[in-house]
Amino acid sequence: MLVLRDVSRTYQDGQPVHALRATNLRVEQGDYISITGPSGSGKSTLLNLVGLLDVPTAGSYLIGGMETADCGPATLGAIRGQLFGFVFQAFHLLPGRTAVENVELGMLYGPHTRRQRRSMATEALERMGLSHRMHADPRQLSGGEKQRVAIARAVAARPRVLFCDEPTGNLDTTNTAAVLAVLRQLNQDGLTLIVVTHDSQVASEARRRLRVTDGVVDET
Ligand code: ADP
Ligand code: ADP
């Protein structure tokens, strides 16, 4: 589904940084992939490239056989909006809005009507085991609940791939377990997961493990 061929990313402000070197990777529908490596090794760079938040400085990135380098920013934005969801370490929820409103906001610029957004947001929160927290303010939620609201927001519009950057980085073991359980369920339901993590427990959940060292990606 997603194919990287000799993809590199060099940052060019001042001294060039070879953040990612000639990387080859094939992501299939239904994969559960972890990305680990030391701080500064290139994990976020890899995640950002595969997630179309950044573009390679060399190499080829194909999505469903289409060369992304031939697409304009509008097309890339549309692909990202329809196929991809994102979850980060910081939950990025708006205080003063309820959980269901936060999830709806994630779909504000999509094609769905207000009614559809409400029904999709409600369903996503139910899948996360948060039916009882629908109208809670994020400030009233535990870390694990906040992250599950953020995951609901990322998956409500039914993307094909979910990208997670340190999704349990701010969570204790109990809340980490709750987040891992919903990720496992989403993957069992067919969602492709790509997860950057420092946590070996999180990495051990994945079926494919990538290790990044100085911009070089190895599958272990
Ligand atoms: P982590 O180790 O949690 O992945 P980093 O602190 O390495 O996070 O980077 C966080 C973000 O800051 C990255 O996604 C990257 O885009 C940006 N960043 C990292 N290093 C630099 C830098 N030297 N100059 C500009 N931006 C950077
Ligand atoms: P990780 O996620 O593994 O911590 P990153 O992908 O964030 O690593 O960073 C890889 C390397 O690229 C680091 O040396 C970092 O400082 C550098 N880097 C990341 N983003 C930028 C940026 N926007 N500008 C310059 N250098 C960056």
Image: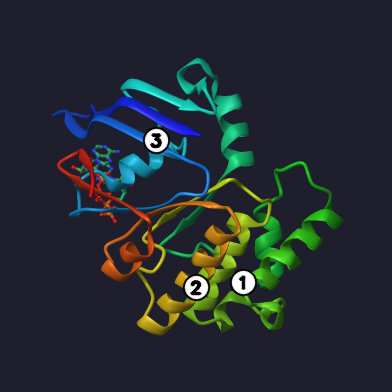
Q: Nearer the viewer, residue 210 or 82?
A: 210
Ligand 2 is found in the corner quadrant, namely top left
Report if the CB atoms under discs 3 and 2 are less than 8 Å apart. no
Left or right placement of residue 48 versus residue 137 in this view = left
Q: Which mark is residue 141?
A: none
Amino acid at circle 2 = Ala
Mark 2 element type = helix
Q: Position of residue 31 (x, y in %)?
A: 46, 49
Q: Which residue is mark 3?
A: 26
Task: Indicate how the structure is coloured in the image.
Answer: rainbow
Mark 1 element type = loop
In terms of sequence position, does the residue under pointer 3 or pointer 2 come before the other? 3
Residue 131 placement: quadrant: bottom right
Q: Which mark is residue 181?
A: 2
Is 66 drawn above or below residue 133 in the view shown?
A: above
Q: Is mark 3 within 8 Å of ligand 2?
A: no
Badge 1 crowding class, 10 Å Cα cut-off, few under 14, some 14 to 19, many 20 or more, is: many
Q: Is residue 97 visible?
A: no
Q: Nearer the viewer, residue 40 or 138?
A: 40
Q: Position of residue 56 (x, y in %)?
A: 35, 26
Badge 2 crowding class, 10 Å Cα cut-off, few under 14, some 14 to 19, many 20 or more, is: some
Is 158 drawn above or below residue 22 in the view shown?
A: below
In terms of sequence position, does the residue under pointer 1 or pointer 3 come before the other? 3
Query: How many numbered discs, if any?
Result: 3
Q: CA distance from mark 1 to mark 2?
A: 9 Å
Badge 3 crowding class, 10 Å Cα cut-off, few under 14, some 14 to 19, many 20 or more, is: few
Q: Nearer the viewer, residue 70 or 105?
A: 70
